Image (spheres, rainbow, N blue to C red):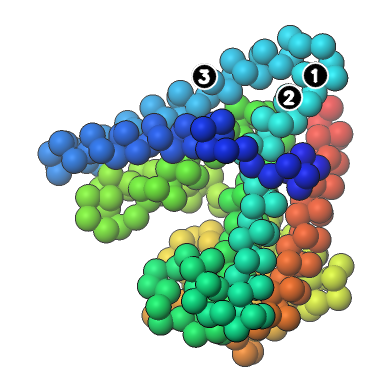
Amino acid sequence: MALDLALGDPPNRWHPVAWIGSLISGGRRLAERIPPRLLTAYGAGLILAVAAVTLAGSLAVGAMSRAMPWPIGLVLEAWLLKLTFSLRGLISAVWEARDALAAADLGSARAAVARHPVATLDAGATASAAVESLSENLTDSWVAPLCFFVVGGLPAAFVYRAVNTADAMIGYREGLLGELGWATARLDDLLNLLPSRLGALAVVAGAGLTRESATDAWRAWRRDGRLTESPNAGQTMAAMAGALRVTLEKHEHYRLGAGAPPDVAAIDRSVRVFAAAAGLGLVAALVVLRAWR
């Protein structure tokens, strides 16, 4: 975590997750030559191949780090683990949207949240998108990689990151992706079932630590956590909506929490809740690792 907050991410040409993305992109291009009736099977084979390559690479690099002198090997393994998550990058993206909204620059704020379509988002919807992204990615960008590292070390964390990256790239229901990304989307849903709920629980606890409403966070999580199309995305988003006592809404898709749409102050509060939840996740992981050993 310290390496991530201090240094952020390396350029894509040096980032293993970008290499994984290039592999997925190559498989996506080849899919255009596959008969439609075989796309689902091809997509399943693609994600298995990507996971296998990622597993082999992480095992090899992990073995290399363990063969090095203790201080060097420790730093290398810590850096490799850092590459499976990006707290600094996530918070920076949210701050970009927040600062644009504070400056009444709605166009830049819309671009920062990168939602489609963004042209119709007003200030409240744009702030909502920023808070939604922050809270949803608590699972993808922190809790889940940490959970898989606790269970299976670096290889498990990297395999999770490969599956999650593939889901972000091909796990959609439009066009040929509806068949190509089916297996990837279902596998990502499965892998995130427990981490997303642990993340929501961390948001509830983080709300209490930051003097937000832990009670409302719990109630909104239990009431609205299942309202999103994904079985996992709504868990942390609903908890965050309750913690802030705002409504997070994606038009014609879901409405989480109760209250007014978030504003700049709510984004600031969401970052504090997020930071507390992330810190609690780290403490919990250390406790589990200590007990395990």
Location of the N terminus (image quadrant): top right
Q: Which amino acid does label 3 sit on?
A: Ala
Instruction: Identify the secondary structure beneath mark 1.
Output: helix
Residue 51 in the image: x percent, y percent? 46, 30
- Whether residue 79 sits left or right of residue 119 in the image: it is right
Residue at position x 72%, y 35% in the image: 150
State how far apart marks 1 and 3 are (Cα).
22 Å
- Disc 3 + disc 2, Cβ < 8 Å: no
Q: Which residue is pictured at 27% across the width and 53% down the height?
A: 178
Q: Are marks 2 and 1 in contact (CB under 8 Å)?
A: yes
Q: Pinpoint residue 261: horizontal percent, then vertical percent.
A: 60, 86
- Per the model, the C-alpha gap separating discs 2 and 1 is 6 Å
Residue 91 pos. (x, y %): 68, 59
The residue indicated by pointer 3 is: 56
Disc with the residue nearer the chain's start (3 vs 2): 3
Please, what is the three-letter code of the amino acid marked with disc 1?
Ile
